[in-house]
Image (cartoon, grey):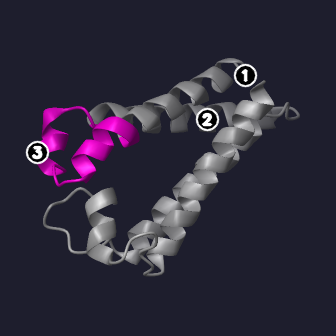
Amino acid sequence: MNLALSLSLFTLLIVMAGLCAVWAQGAHWPFASAPALASWVVGDAKATGMPPPQQMRLLALALALAALTMLALGFDLPGPLNQIAAYAGAGFCGLFAIRGIIGFLPFWRRRYGGQPFAVIDGLIYSPGCILIAQLYFTLVVERF
C-alpha cells in the first residue's frame, strides 16, 4: 500500500516538476499564450507572463526533490537513509500544508485573486496541497 501511494505521488510531483521546467524554457503549453497560462497558474491579475525562468527552475528543482523524497518514503531504506527520508518528508509535509492552508486565507485571495486562478486555487491547488501534505504525513509517521 505504501509503495503504491509513494509511486502515485512521485508521479504527480515529477509531472509538476517537468511542467515547471518546460515553462522555465519559455513554453506556455497547454495554453495558446503566456498570459493565458499565467492567468491559470500565477493568479496575479497584472501578470502578463510567467515568473522569471530562474524562479521556475528553482520550483522545478524543489518539486523534483519532493518527488524523490516521496519515492524514498515508499521503500524501506537502510540505516540513516530512513531518517533522512523521514526528516525531508516532514519538511515537505510542512511546506505543502502551509501552501494549502494559506490558499484559503483572505490576504492570499486579495494578492492572488486573478481569475480563473482564484477559483482553481480554491477548488484544486490548495486542497491538493493539503492532500499531498496528509499523504506525506502518513508515510513520515511510519518512519518515526
Q: On the image, which quarter does residue 15 sit in?
A: bottom right
Is 57 located above or below residue 69 in the figure? below
Q: Position of residue 68 (x, y in %)?
A: 69, 49
Q: Quadrant of the C terminus?
A: top right
Residue 104 among those drawn in magenta: yes
Q: Quadrant of the N terminus?
A: top right
The mark nearer the N terminus, 1 or 3, is 3
Q: Position of residue 36 (x, y in %)?
A: 29, 69
Mark linked to residue 143 = 1
Q: Badges 3 and 2: C-beta atoms under 8 Å apart?
A: no
Identify the element where label 1 is drawn: loop
Identify the element where label 2 is drawn: helix
Q: Nearer the viewer, mark 3 or mark 2?
A: 3
Q: Which residue is mark 2?
A: 89
Label 2 and label 1: CA atoms lie apart by: 10 Å
Identity of the residue drawn at 24% across and 53% down:
116
Characterize the magenta stretch by its predominant secondary structure. Answer: helix
Identity of the residue drawn at 53% across and 70% down:
21
Label 1 and label 3: CA atoms lie apart by: 39 Å
Identity of the residue drawn at 34% across and 58% down:
41
Where are the magenta residues, as a range?
103-125
Q: Badges 2 and 1: C-beta atoms under 8 Å apart?
A: yes
Q: Nearer the viewer, mark 1 or mark 3?
A: 3
Q: Is residue 70 left or right of residue 77?
A: left
User: Does residue 99 appear in the picture of this structure?
Assistant: no
Identity of the residue drawn at 26% across and 73% down:
35
